[in-house]
Image (cartoon, helix red, strand yellow):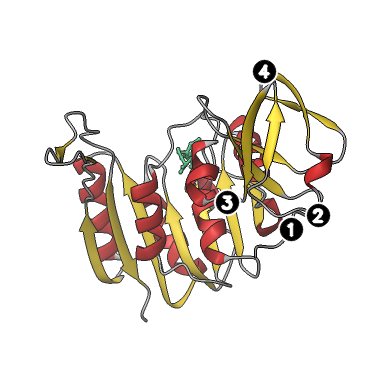
């Protein structure tokens, strides 16, 4: 038995033959995509998984997973892919109830992964220097239903640094992460981790050099390569198409 729908909760509508959409369980008609309106009044108090008839077809209303939430992000800035986002959270030691700082917010895809990892008792502060991107991130995080655990700050962190203290994790996805590593060290609690995401080797080298210079501990760098498989009875093999490159991850720990 799963919890019945409460009014205002975020749900995912699984549509046959069309992409899933995130929406709220509300009483009364609400707009949905560019397609029209939908009324979910009769779902309130019912269990997830029920059929919803919309535009003459049957669909299912489910509780969203992280994959639904990230897939629904509207992109302005280039987003971190799920494989990198969840591993960045691992490298940075993000945990339930944790306090996390992140820059830049971009489209908020990594923010959604971090807000999920800290859970309802945690806090993510995300910095972004562009007001339009900050607003886009805020809308994406709100659509995912996670905005109550995220603080959005318009700030150039290369120029002005991070204005938080005692956080367990700092995540950096911006062009010059090395410029923020000293400030990140100040923001971190002892034992806390910084993790960075950079698309080029040149950026990675400079980042790791600075991590070492600033005496971060347990410094390492890693690249994740994801290859999806076509599974057919008696004909299982790797898919022909593959995303060849996303970015390099690095991390370091504040010990003294
Ligand atoms: N991780 C994000 C994407 C970040 S793209 C996601 O998954 O959606 C990098 C972002 O860093 C851009 O939005 C850019 O505006 C921002 N940025 C670049 N330099 C910055 C700085 N000095 N301070 C704050 N944000 C910065």
Mark positioned earlier in the residue sequence (4 or 1): 1
Q: Position of residue 47 (x, y in %)?
A: 71, 55
The answer to whether the residues at label 4 and label 2 have Cβ atoms under 8 Å apart is no
State whether residue 246 appears in this view: yes
Answer with left or right where residue 184 lies relative to residue 46: left
Residue drawn at point x = 52 percent, y = 29 percent: 19
Q: Secondary structure at mark 1?
A: loop
Mark positioned earlier in the residue sequence (2 or 1): 1
Residue drawn at point x = 62 percent, y = 51 percent: 63
Q: Position of residue 240 (x, y in %)?
A: 16, 29
Q: CA distance from mark 2 to mark 1?
A: 5 Å
The answer to whether the residues at label 4 and label 1 have Cβ atoms under 8 Å apart is no
Q: CA distance from mark 4 to mark 3?
A: 30 Å
The answer to whether the residues at label 2 and label 1 have Cβ atoms under 8 Å apart is yes
Residue drawn at point x = 35 percent, y = 53 percent: 196
Q: Position of residue 191 (x, y in %)?
A: 41, 79
Mark positioned earlier in the residue sequence (4 or 3): 4
Q: Which residue does the numbered mark 1 point to in the structure image?
A: 4
Residue 16 sits above or below residue 89 on the image: above
Mark seen at residue 34 = 4
State whether residue 26 appears in this view: no
Mark positioned earlier in the residue sequence (2 or 3): 2
Q: Secondary structure at mark 4?
A: loop
Mark seen at residue 126 = 3
């Amino acid at each position: 038995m799963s919890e019945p729908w409460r009014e205002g909760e975020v749900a995912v509508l699984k549509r046959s033959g069309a992409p899933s959409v995130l929406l709220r369980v509300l009483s009364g008609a609400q707009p949905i995509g560019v397609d029209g309106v939908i009324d979910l009044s009769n779902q309130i108090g019912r269990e997830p998984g029920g059929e919803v008839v919309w535009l003459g077809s049957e669909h299912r209303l489910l509780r969203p997973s992280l994959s639904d939430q990230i897939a629904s992000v509207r992109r302005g800035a280039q987003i971190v892919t799920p494989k990198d986002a969840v591993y960045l959270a691992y490298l940075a030691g993000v945990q339930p109830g944790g306090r996390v700082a992140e820059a830049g917010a971009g489209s908020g895809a990594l923010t959604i992964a971090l807000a999920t990892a800290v859970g309802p008792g945690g806090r993510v502060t995300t910095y972004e220097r562009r007001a339009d991107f900050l607003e886009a991130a805020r809308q994406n995080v709100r659509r995912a239903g996670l905005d109550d655990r995220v603080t959005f700050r318009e700030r150039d962190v290369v120029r002005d640094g991070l204005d938080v203290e005692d956080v367990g994790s700092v995540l950096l996805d911006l062009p010059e992460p090395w410029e923020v590593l000293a400030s990140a060290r100040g923001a971190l609690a002892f034992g806390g981790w910084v993790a960075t995401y950079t698309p080029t080797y040149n950026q990675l080298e400079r980042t790791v050099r600075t991590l070492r210079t600033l005496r971060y501990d347990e410094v390492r760098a890693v690249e994740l390569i994801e290859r999806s498989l076509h599974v057919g009875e008696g004909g299982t093999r790797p898919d022909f198409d593959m995303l060849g490159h996303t970015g390099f991850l690095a991390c370091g720990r504040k010990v003294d």
